[in-house]
Amino acid sequence: MNPRELRLAIALAAILVVGGGYLAYKRLGGWKSRLESREIALAQRRVEAESLLSMKDYWKARSEFLNANQPEFKNRNEADNSLLTFVKDRAKTHEVELSLAQLEQPEDQTGVRASNMIVDGKAEYEKMWRFIHSLQDDPKNFITIRSMELRPNLEDTKVLEVTELRIQKWFKVSNSEG
């Protein structure tokens, strides 16, 4: 091999070694960054798991409360009637005049089902607020208010009107229903 070919071979070998080293460096850098991001994700999951485990007793007590107190959804008619009766009784107790009490389709979520209704009514300010509060004052009733619209009565400023008051009563679904 003449000196020119030798220099060319050395240059080619140097290029291959430097290029291969660069590619290996890039791959190792990518591998390292992926490992670091996985390590961060695992550390976050560990913190979350420790946090959840520290709240185990709290969630266990809540689960026991639900199992002991939440009524079971037997059929839609019974669920709707219990919600309708509850709302009408509370309205009567707080002297709220209901102009609409319309039942809607039940809502399903994992393990629970809600009986739904829309209510429109009016009463004096204090009576209306007490009525709305009384709907959710006892957690054992499993009543939630999804949304509502309040507006003052333009003819009588002592009266508050509620429209589109969406009320839900939650029931547990038996395992056979799923």
Image (cartoon, rainbow, N blue to C red):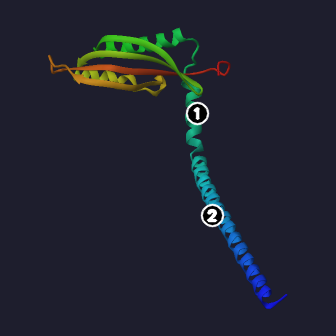
Alpha carbon distance from label 2 to label 1: 41 Å
Pinpoint residue 100: horizontal percent, then vertical percent: 34, 11
Secondary element at image label 1 = helix
Residue annotated with mark 1: 63
Left or right side of 170 for 100: left
Drawn side of residue 27 relative to residue 82, left or right: right
- The residue at the point 71 percent across, 78 percent down is 15
The residue under the point 38% across, 16% down is 118
| Kind of residue at disc 1 | Ser
Question: What amino acid is labelled 2 in the image?
Answer: Ser
Q: Residue at x 48, y 24 (%)?
A: 142
Q: Is residue 19 above or below residue 103?
A: below
- 97 shown above or below 6: above
Element at badge 2? helix
Whole-percent x, y for residue 103 in the image: 43, 12
Q: Which mark is residue 33?
A: 2
In the displayed structure, 102 sits above or below 111; it is above
Q: Residue 111: which quarter of the image? A: top right
Q: Residue drawn 65% across and 18% down?
A: 177
